[in-house]
Amino acid sequence: MLDNILSILIFFPALAAVLGFIVNKESIRAYGVVVAIIEFSLALLLWFFFDNNVSGMQFMETIALVPTFGINYIVGVDGISLFIVILAAFFTMIGIASLGDTKDIKNMIITLLFLQMTMVGVFVALDAIVFYVFWELSLVPMLYIIGAWGGPLRIYASVKFFLYTFTGSLVMLVGMLFMAYFYYQATGQWSFAILDWYRLILPESFQLWLFVAFFFGFAIKVPMFPFHTWLPYAHGQAPTIGSVILAAILLKMGTYAFIRFSLPLFPDASTYFMFPIAILAIIMIIYTAMVAYAQKDIKQVVAYSSVSHMGVIILGTFALNVEGISGSIFLMIAHGVVSGALFFLVGVIYDRRHTKMMDQFGGLASVMPKFATIFGIMMMASVGLPLTINFVGEFLSLLGFYQQSHILTLLAGMAIIVGAIYMLSAYKKMFFGEVTIEENKNLPDVNKRELIALVPLVIITIWLGIYPKPLLGPINTSVEAVVQLMHEKSITEEAKQRIPNLDILINRTSAKEAN
Amino acid sequence: MLSPINVSIESLNLMTLAPMLIPIVGALLILVIDLFKSGQDKSMYVMLSLLILGIDFIFLLEAAGIFEKNGTVMGVFDVMLIDGLAILSQFIIVSASMLFIPLALTQKRFHEFSYPEFFALFLFMIAGFQFMVATDNLILIFVGLETASLALYTLIAMHNRDKSFEAAVKYFTMGALAAGFYSFGSMVFYALTGSIEINQIAAVLEANNFADIGFVLIGVVFMLASFGFKLSMVPFHTWTPDVYEGSSAALAGYMSIVPKIAAFVVAMRLFEFLIHSGVVWLEVILYIGVVVTMTMANIWALVQSDVKRMLAYSSISHAGFVMAAILIGTTQSNSALFLYWILFSFTNLGSFSMLWISRQKNLPAGQSSDHSYNKFAGLVKTSPVAASIMALFMLSLAGLPPFALFWGKMYMISSAVTGGYTVLALIMALNSAIAGYYYLKLIVYMFMKDPIINHSGNISMVNATLSLKTIIGIAAVGTIFAVLALNSLLEFVTAFVYNSGY
């Protein structure tokens, strides 16, 4: 059964969603929760049977789709993707479980289950076209969630979200087709399998162009600095659940793809573009942090802070060494947990007051103490307080980049201080002081359903902040293999120097397959 | 004294005519039935046409078998040319026709289907298209083209509305102009080479190394203009939206597929050798034509307020996209053309059929056209299945994986990449992004807006019958599961195109 566990993980939610059309509206919530719990348990089972000492792909499956053109359904999981898959299952679960009163709840839950299929699919696909299929398919449920349940500008926001990402990915598709063509020229066979592509060493000029083509697709998804304008709209208009999934999982597709595609396929181009991208990332960190400070809407503050932290992830990724990349992967998980939780919290207060303007609040700490406590913990985590989950990732990312450039790292570190300023001031505006507005005096504190979502997130935040090793171990093993591969593949002097040689033998097959 | 010409019947290879003769005989049969016993129900004629097309299809299968064994077959004084292109395109023509004809079995009564002439003309038209693709004789191409076009004009006019007459007359005038251009172009080639067979023309031109390049270019200009009209390339496209709007949605969907594949095949036969001979000027003209057709049609489609007109512009854009295959001119690109068109015919016929089943008999008050976007607003609330299927077709047309058209698009862009047309590949990709907007617009109307017009009951399925639903079901299944059939389809198409020497 475990041989097919990844396919089950992908298609179980989709099957459940199709069957969900038949389920009665009254019972759909229970149905959705049960399906999501099963899916999450399967994801945990995957973790349980995951071999931490293997750096390569595990649980691989291959089915020929279009062998004439080299397209095969190949899935597999390694330390880089494992925890994001679990995170996706986890967030869908608590997302459905904590879903408040929503109109057309049946459509919402079915859409969420479809979305889950595409999310898992993206992170386990090992064939570029299969990856692309899930990548593009994930736009549709999100489009529907934002467009049907969003705020007043929802249609504009959803269409902008869709078209931006769609355009970027089409450029990426051209890059993929080029890559397959180069593989065809080199070997005489078409192949879109990423592991096959890893073996291909390209001349630097080709690498640069292809890197740019892939960069468009990924950077828009992340979103990186000049392409980030769709995100505040999407977050601003999306319903709570949409924002949570978007921030926690969908954005990670971009950063994950950088590590899966850009770095190992184009090590020289990655070195070449390291500083331009690092500068973009730092602009992204500082600029969006300043924009966040100027916001009056608490959801926009969280949205911009989320973009800001994505900048740190990019910076860590392009440190091109084990610390940086491991840190950035860990930060992806951390960012997912923390900003997901923050969007949940904003949703909690929005459900009660139907406003997100910070000047409508004030003194909430005395009215809603539990809410204020959880919000406080999450905000501290977002700022990067030691012993919280974000700190580990940020610290490692910056440590990694410190080896490449001291000044840029210092600038990025400064930005974290700016982050503290806007977060703390937002917290002050909302929670401290006198309760000035009459409506705020009798707000109910967080209820049980909301606690189902929030308490696990708090536990994870602190647990992994104190003891990150269960995650960092497997991540590290896989990242070492990637870095070693990059070092071996690189052809320019500069890249050989920037990417450390780890002198390890890459153990590409799992022990089970070796038998 | 003239000696009698001795031609053995066997050398004529009359079997090559069989696939074309079947619809002609069938059409005559329908007319004869009407003579003896008029006033039969349309369902009888529909099923009869379906049977005749089915026989036609079986003969095509046989021809395909012969082609796989013996290669290209010539017949009837070497006028007929049954090669892979001819067989592939006839497959598309006949199967699209088989999908189209049951659409006549509507809930509402429409004028045209009450005449048996409609079905007779329809079968004559198919025979015309089949002749057009199965020869490289310029005269026979012309005969086929005109047979098919004249029948098609009449089919449009039979819809019996003011707009239909306008459409038919407009199409007729434009078609006549195109025919004029075509005959003038053929005349130039004949004058240059003394032959009306495309392969002879190619051989003679290559033998004298394109000495009269000026005249060749004049001939090419006329041919390009003529096929520009037929394929609705910009700037010869102006008739398309009006004609689509005037004809019934089903026929419009049909027109966006079948006449175009016939024209594509002829264009492929004619332009391929010219491009490979290094006539740079032609390459530049085609390049510009392809890019302008894709882009401008997309931009016009953005501003349409009627879904049918939007789909009309979108099919212009798709035709431009596919025209790129002829420009690239490799085996991969020519296979991509057929692959694309097979997948496109499923999707596009499906989406036009969705318009067709929501067609009311008369224009309701407050609506300026049959299929305005507003009509589809909030469709998901009134009939979620129809909305989902329509959205499926739109996503497929936009090129969203894993639906049918994505694979065609991907293969086509890949052939541009492989053929060395990098910029063209990027333009094609970006055009798909522009197109995404207007397909999305319909989805936004259906899924995210509230119903605007007060419907009395369920308007989206007002015209639906079991047979219409079956056709849509087939199209939807084909659209979703195209990926499963893709490998065998690709192998089949590539083998046929490759063995025909394209």
Image (cartoon, coloured by chain):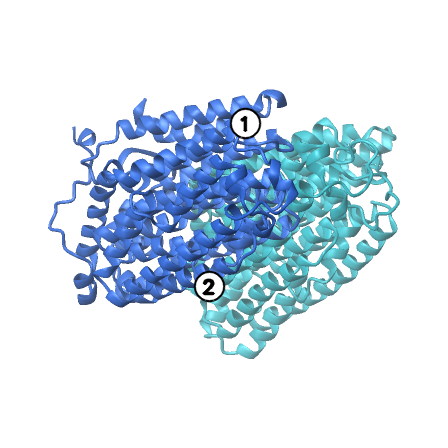
Chain colours: A blue, B cyan
Mark 1 lies on residue:
A18
* Residue A40 image offset from top left, x and y in percent: 40, 28
Mark count: 2
Report in which chain the residue with disc 2 lies.
A
Q: Can I make out residue B213 in this image?
A: yes
Quadrant in the rendering for residue B443: top right
Query: Residue shown at 63%/48% (left/top)?
Result: A154
Q: Quadrant of residue B236?
A: bottom right
Q: Which residue is mark 2?
A: A226
Name the spot of residue A4 as percent of width and height, x first.
34, 27
Q: Are marks 1 and 2 on the same chain?
A: yes
> If you read the primary sequence from the N terminus, does the residue marked by circle 1 or circle 2 appear first?
1
Amino acid identity at mark 2? Pro
Q: Position of residue B165 (x, y in %)?
A: 85, 53
What subunit carries mark 1? A
Dot 1: element: helix
Q: Quadrant of the N terminus of chain B?
A: bottom right
Question: Element under label 2?
Answer: helix
Q: Residue furthest left?
A: A503
Instruction: Give amino acid for label 1.
Output: Val
Residue in the foreground of this view, choosing between B174 and A175? A175
